[in-house]
Structures are given as C-alpha cells and as structure tokens.
Image (cartoon, grey):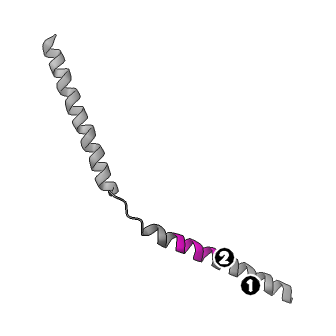
C-alpha cells in the first residue's frame, strides 16, 4: 500500500465517524422533546370520542325508529 492509499483510508474512517457522531447528537436531542400527550393517551382519547359518537348515533337511530 502506498502513502496515498493510507491517507484515503483514514479520510473515509474520519467521514464515517463524523456521520456517526452527528446522528448520535441528533438522536440525543430528539429524545429530549416532551410531547404534551403520550401515544397511549391519544389513542384512548380517540377511541373514547369514537365510542361516544357511536352511542349518540345509536340513540338517534333508536329514537328515529320509535317515531316512525
């Protein structure tokens, strides 16, 4: 191996190390973000709203059938 090949190899290693450290830093900063509501709470809220909507529609249909 000549000298240029060794320098090229070290340059490639430095580039990959730089990318790894950059993504690690981005990941670390991303984890610090706090959401106002967790995904489980959001899912429960949506399911509860859907259930309430279903109940109201069901009651409306029952009233409609009684009036006919």
Query: What secondary structure characterizes most of the magenta part?
Result: helix
Q: Residue 11's x, y, as percent?
A: 75, 81
Please, is residue 43 above or below residue 31 in the view?
Answer: above
Residue shown at the point (26%, 40%) measured from the top left: 49
Q: Quadrant of residue 10?
A: bottom right
Quadrant of the rendering where the C terminus is positioned? top left
Instruction: Find residue 60 and name its label.
Output: none
CA neighbours of label 1 inside 10 A, class few (<14), some (14 to 19), many (20+): few
Residue 35 showing in the rendered view: yes
Residues under labels 1 and 2: Cα distance?
10 Å
Element type at mark 1: helix
Q: Is residue 34 left or right of residue 61?
A: right
Instruction: Find residue 16 and name its label.
Output: 2
User: 12 or 46: nearer the eye?
Assistant: 46
Q: Residue 40's x, y, as percent?
A: 30, 55
Return the disc, 1 or 2, that comes first in the chain's sequence: 1
CA neighbours of label 2 inside 10 A, class few (<14), some (14 to 19), many (20+): few
In the rendered image, residue 22 lying in the magenta stretch gets the answer yes
Please, is residue 9 above or below residue 60 in the view?
Answer: below
Q: Is residue 26 left or right of residue 7?
A: left
Residue shown at the point (27%, 49%) measured from the top left: 44
> CB under 8 Å between callouts 1 and 2?
no
Residue shown at the point (42%, 65%) measured from the top left: 33
- Residue that numbered label 1 is attached to: 10
Q: Quadrant of residue 35?
A: bottom left
Q: How many marks?
A: 2
Please, is residue 31 above or below residue 62 in the view?
Answer: below
Please, is residue 57 above or below residue 52 in the view?
Answer: above
Q: Residue 1's x, y, as percent?
A: 84, 88
Q: Is residue 49 left or right of residue 14?
A: left
Q: What is the span of residues highlighted in magenta in the rendered image?
A: 19-26
In the rendered image, residue 47 lying in the magenta stretch gets the answer no
């Amino acid at each position: 191996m000549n000298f240029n090949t060794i320098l090229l190899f070290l340059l490639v290693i430095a580039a990959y190390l730089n990318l790894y450290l950059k993504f690690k830093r981005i990941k670390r900063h991303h984890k610090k973000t706090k959401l106002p509501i967790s995904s489980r709470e959001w899912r429960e809220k949506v399911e509860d709203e859907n259930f309430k909507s279903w109940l109201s529609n069901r009651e409306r249909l029952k009233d409609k059938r009684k009036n006919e």
